[in-house]
Structures are given as structure tokens and as C-alpha cells.
Amino acid sequence: MILNDTIVALATPSGAGAVAIVRVSGPNAIEFVADVFQSIKNKDLRKQKTHTLHLGFIKDDAKIIDQVLVSLFKGTNSYTGEPTVEISCHGSTFIQQQIIQLLLRKGCRMASAGEFTMRSFLNGKMDLSQAEAVADLIASDNEAAHQLAMQQMRGGFSNEIAKLREELLNFASLIELELDFSEEDVEFADRSAFRDLVNRIQFVLKRLLDSFAVGNVIKNGIPVAIVGEPNVGKSTLLNALLNEERAIVSDIAGTTRDTIEDELIIEGIGFRFIDTAGIRETEDIVESIGIQKTFEKIEQAQVVLYLFESLKFKTQNLEYITEIEKVKNKYPLKPLVVIINKVDLLTDEELQRIQSQLEALEVKLETTSAKHKTGIEELKNTLLSFVNTGALRNNETIVTNTRHYDSLIKALEEIQKVQYGLDMNISADLMAIDIRQALYYFGEITGQVTNDELLGNIFSNFCIGK
Ligand SMILES: Nc1nc2c(ncn2[C@@H]2O[C@H](COP(=O)(O)OP(=O)(O)OP(=O)(O)O)[C@@H](O)[C@H]2O)c(=O)[nH]1
Ligand SMILES: [Mg+2]
């Protein structure tokens, strides 16, 4: 990791805007900018206090490039933990490029993706999971995802891990001390207190691992597949949910051939609805490819909305009940909502009869008229009931990051080995190895244990300028 040079990048999105910010960070940030900056009050930037603003011109020798406002962050008082200057210029792409080119000629280097945040981490301004939360924060596009990223950035989850790691480290040193005195057969590490800690760690790790299901869902949205026979109103339902004419609707069976996806945020939770080709036997090659895709989408979905057409239920025979059961048995583990659509075509008596007949089935049942937009709000509430948002509301720590999840699993495996060792009364030297391993995985999360490859992976996912 090279930290001793000065980097520059555009911090605002590329393209034209009202203003743009060029960010410079590194040991020579202030000198390099001072060289090209002419204050309107003839101030020398090098002599100004930290956290001050200065109006002036960026000049390339005699040529004025732009009138700008410069913010100064001196010493370690900045996002990156090193001297930083932010130049707010007019947002033309030409001006942005001219300023960046000028600073590159002065000796800056173009920042790589995420390098500002990586420096922040390397300079101890934040731990690794907080740095990762910065990327999540920038990417968050709904209330819940935003709240999670914010919580992680404030250190919610790494504090907990860091504390447990500390306690475990204490025991590790005591047990290693025993090794030095192995001749004397002493126990420095109180085994019952240690047992206690190991239990507590397992409890916390399991809770964090469980929370990943929620975290993942919040971050990526919940995929919901809308499936059923042709013409039952799947595309009409998608449109009703989105409140927009997203998919083509017609009374011709087999209208939808490719899957159509769109996202809707319900009470802060993102749902990704997938309208699919109606399932039926068909000779049509294109349609059958679409149907094949429908089955794939069902596999990937976290919730399946299975639509039936109300007309099917008009007759008194109970054939449709077997059909619903078939669907239920086909995907026993998928949260399933059976929807009777086109209820506007039923009389009230018919609807009541059907509802009471279906009660025994123990499936989540909704009745809708996609065409007239009735039952849609109830359906949204049912969808929300699948998401355990309790943890979110209670401000519990939630894991959203796959890397953290992997490290937590490995840490849990190692801790279980330690537990086993305790139960089996194994020797201190063997136990010490397992504890060290567990400590390693804890450290991976907060960044106490890192390597260049890991850091490269994490920060390359950032945008340049962050
Ligand atoms: N009366 C009534 N008609 C509906 C309702 N929902 C959909 N329809 C009609 O049913 C026909 C089929 O609707 P689509 O939404 O295209 O059905 P689909 O399930 O997407 O059909 P495929 O894409 O062919 O599988 C259209 O003529 C819709 O206007 C409803 O709630 N009530
Ligand atoms: Mg359709």
C-alpha cells in the first residue's frame, strides 16, 4: 500500500452539473493546490487554518481556469486522515478535466477506486466494516438499506465483534501462559468463565448469522415471482402493484413470453416483482423457452404469488383444491401466496363459498381484481409479513455483507471446536490453536487482520473519488 503520494479525483458524479468537487488528498495536497490557486484576498493557502473556506481562482500559469471555493483540511483532520483539499468548481466537464489535469502535472496521481476510503481505513479513521458501509450507504436506494448502512458505518456491528475478540484474546494469552508453565500443571485461565465466554460468543455469532437473511433481503430486495396459467392476469397484477403500465396485457393466452422485472418499495423494503410466462403445454418454441424461465424464476424467488382465475372456481366441483395442493407440494419450502384473481367476475355468495372452502388448505390466500385494483393493499401487507422487519425496527445489529457472513461462519466453526475441546478436556496447546483461528476470523471482519488482496477486492468495488 502506497500512502506517501498525493491523489486526486472527481468526488461528484461524472458529467455536467451546477458544481463539481475535485478532491485532493495526501502529504502534498495543500502545496499542490496552493501552487495553482490565487486567493481573491491574496492569502497563501499553506498558512490558513484547517476547516476554512477560500474563494479564488484556479490558474494554469497566466490562464484562469475557473473561479472556485477551496475547503482545507489540515493534518489528520479529514475523511482520509491526511491533508485534504476539496475544490468546488463550476460543474462543466471541461473545467473538471482541466483542474484534474493541472494537478496531475503538479505531481498528483489519479486516485484508484475507493482509494480515499481505503486511506481512511489505513489511517485508522474507520475500521474495515465501517469503510464497507460507506459503499453500501452510497448504493442504498431505500429507507431500510439506508438505515442499515448508517448503523454499520457508525460501527454498530464491529463494536460488538471487537469486544468479543478482546475478551477472547485475554483468554488466549492466559492459556498460552499455561503452556509456558506446563511442567507445573497450573491453570491461569478459569475454565468455567471461559466456558461462559465461549457460550456467549456462539450466541452472538448465531444471532448475527441469522440476521444475514434479513440483511441480504433489505440490501438486495426480495424477489417475488408472479406465476400461474396463461391469461389469469399476472401482467395486470404486476401493473397494478407498480401502478404503471409496465407489462403488455391482452386476452390472448401466452402474451408474456420473457420475464419482466421491476422494483417496488413497500414501507421501506424493496420488492422485486417478476412477471413470468404463463405455464401450460405448448408447441411454440419461444413460449416454451419462456416457461422454462418461469421455473427458474420460481427457484430464485423468495416469495411466489400463484395466480388462479376466479372463473375456474365458479363450478361447485373441488378440482381446483387439488390444483392448489399440487402447487403447494411442488415448492414446500417457498413462501407461497395463492391469489384468486378476477374476483369482480364472482358474486358475493360465490366468493364467500370459495373462501370458506379454501380455509382448510392452510395457505396464504388473497383475492384480487387486478383489473380494478382491489385487494392490492392487502396483498402488499401479506408480502410485508414475510419479512422479519422486527430486528430492523428494534435497531438490532444486522449483517448485510457476504464477506462478513463468511468470516462469521468460519469464526463460529472455530469456536465450536474450542467448545468441543473444552468438553473433551483437551490440552491447552491444542485449544490455543483453535482460539487463534477464531481470533483470526474475527479480525478479518474489523480489519485487524488484512492483506493487500482482501483490501484490493473490497475497495475496487467503490467508485473513483470515494
Ligand atoms: N375481469 C377481470 N379481468 C382481468 C383481471 N385481471 C386481468 N384481466 C384480464 O385478463 C386478460 C389477461 O390478462 P394478462 O394480465 O395479460 O394475463 P397474464 O396472466 O399475464 O397472461 P399471459 O401473459 O398470457 O400468461 C386481460 O384481458 C386482462 O384485462 C381482473 O381482475 N378482472
Ligand atoms: Mg402476462
Image (cartoon, helix red, strand yellow):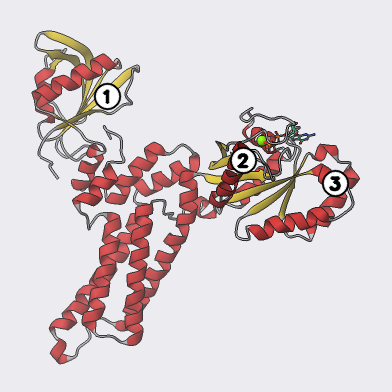
Tell me whether circle 3 and circle 1 mark residues in contact (CB < 8 Å). no
Circle nearer the N terminus (3, 1)? 1
Note whether ligand 2 is within 8 Å of mark 1: no
User: Of circles 2 and 1, which is in front?
Assistant: 2
Q: Which mark is residue 159?
A: none
Farthest bottom residue? Answer: 184
Q: Which residue is mark 2?
A: 276
Q: Quadrant of the C terminus?
A: top left
Note whether ligand 1 is within 8 Å of mark 3: no
Instruction: Please tell me whether residue 16 is drawn above or below residue 250 in the rendered image.
Output: above
User: Of circles 3 and 2, which is in front?
Assistant: 2
Q: Which residue is mark 1?
A: 21
- Mark 2 crowdedness (10 Å alpha carbons): few <14, some 14-19, many ≥20: many
- SS under mark 2: loop
- What amino acid does circle 2 point to? Thr
Residue for point 38% across, 51% down: 401
Q: Distance between the Cα atoms at labels 3 and 1?
A: 61 Å
Residue 377, can we see it?
Answer: yes
- What amino acid does circle 1 point to? Ile
Circle nearer the N terminus (2, 1)? 1
Q: Which residue is mark 3?
A: 351
